[in-house]
Image (tube, rainbow, N blue to C red):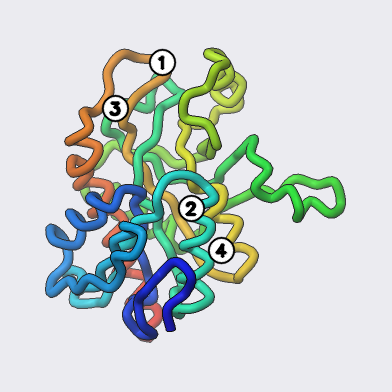
Amino acid sequence: MPTPHIEAQKGDFAKVVLMPGDPKRAEWIAKTFLKDAKLVNSIRGALAYTGKAPDGSLVSVMASGMGMPSIGIYSHELYTSYGVEAIIRIGTCGSYQKDVKLRDIVIAQGACTDSNWMGEHSLYGGTFSAISDYSLLEAAVTAAKAGGFNYHVGNIFSSDVFYDYRPDAWKKWANLSVLGVEMEAYALYAVAAELGKKALAVCTVSDSFVEEGKMSPEERQEGLKNMVMVALVAAEKFSSCLSK
């Protein structure tokens, strides 16, 4: 049945969903990488498709929108109302480290944040450490190695703010060896943990805080093939494990 934010019917989504932020990127991924892709959601412009991956397994792709509140809503509804077992976020990030170059792939083992996303869950004065699912992480690393892609595995920072009025705020995270910044992974990992599901974030470096240069808007929308290929291989492996 449809949810408050998704019009798809029961069975429209595969067990694993690739989740870019941009609806146009979701459409491009579906048309470029999936066979017989069917549009299953268009409400609020959050385009979602289900089709066949190169190995024949079913994979869905759906836009999350920008920020933790948005991906928090969509991931929760996919996990609880549509039988989705794994979500792989595929997006862009800004680099905090000199060796993390433009167009490199960042596979997020964990996510830090200064958001209050888990505020009400800090019942004992603690801080929730948001981590990815290891099986998805391992599959993504294996795929990146096999593809010969430049990749990095480690911590990322999920921010509520894109335009920060504090120009040097990022440096405290860089000093802790955080690889870069994006805006969704922490919430995705938290929702997955709470619901006993699986999640991973794989990002392409679109700009850098330490070096000149950035990807164009066109590249941010469609120039992310290596990252998508890595995520698709991880999705295929997850699907094959489910079928055993």
Note whether 138 is above or below 108 in the view shown: below
In the displayed structure image, the side of residue 97 where residue 157 appears, left or right: right
- Mark whose residue sits in front, 1 or 2: 2
Instruction: Return the residue at label 1.
Output: 210
Q: Tell me which label, 2 or 4, sits earlier in the chain.
A: 2
| SS type, badge 2 | helix
Few, some or many residues within 10 Å of mark 4 (<14, 14–19, 20+)? many
Q: CA distance from mark 1 to mark 4?
A: 32 Å
- Mark whose residue sits in front, 2 or 3: 2
In the displayed structure image, the side of residue 147 where residue 61 appears, left or right: right
Q: CA distance from mark 2 to mark 4?
A: 14 Å
The residue that appears at 36% across and 59% down in the rendered structure is 44
Q: Tell me which label, 1 or 2, sits earlier in the chain.
A: 2
Instruction: Return the residue at label 3.
Output: 102
The quarter holding residue 36 reads bottom left
Q: Tell me which label, 4 or 3, sits earlier in the chain.
A: 3
Instruction: Return the residue at label 2.
Output: 70
The quarter holding residue 8 reads bottom left
Q: Tell me which label, 1 or 4, sits earlier in the chain.
A: 4
Q: Tell me which label, 1 or 3, sits earlier in the chain.
A: 3
- On residue 90, which mark appears? none
Question: Residue 189 location in percent, x, y?
Answer: 55, 55
- Mark whose residue sits in front, 4 or 3: 4
What amino acid type is highlighted by mark number 3? Leu
Q: Tell me which label, 2 or 3, sits earlier in the chain.
A: 2
Question: Residue 140 location in percent, x, y?
Answer: 36, 54
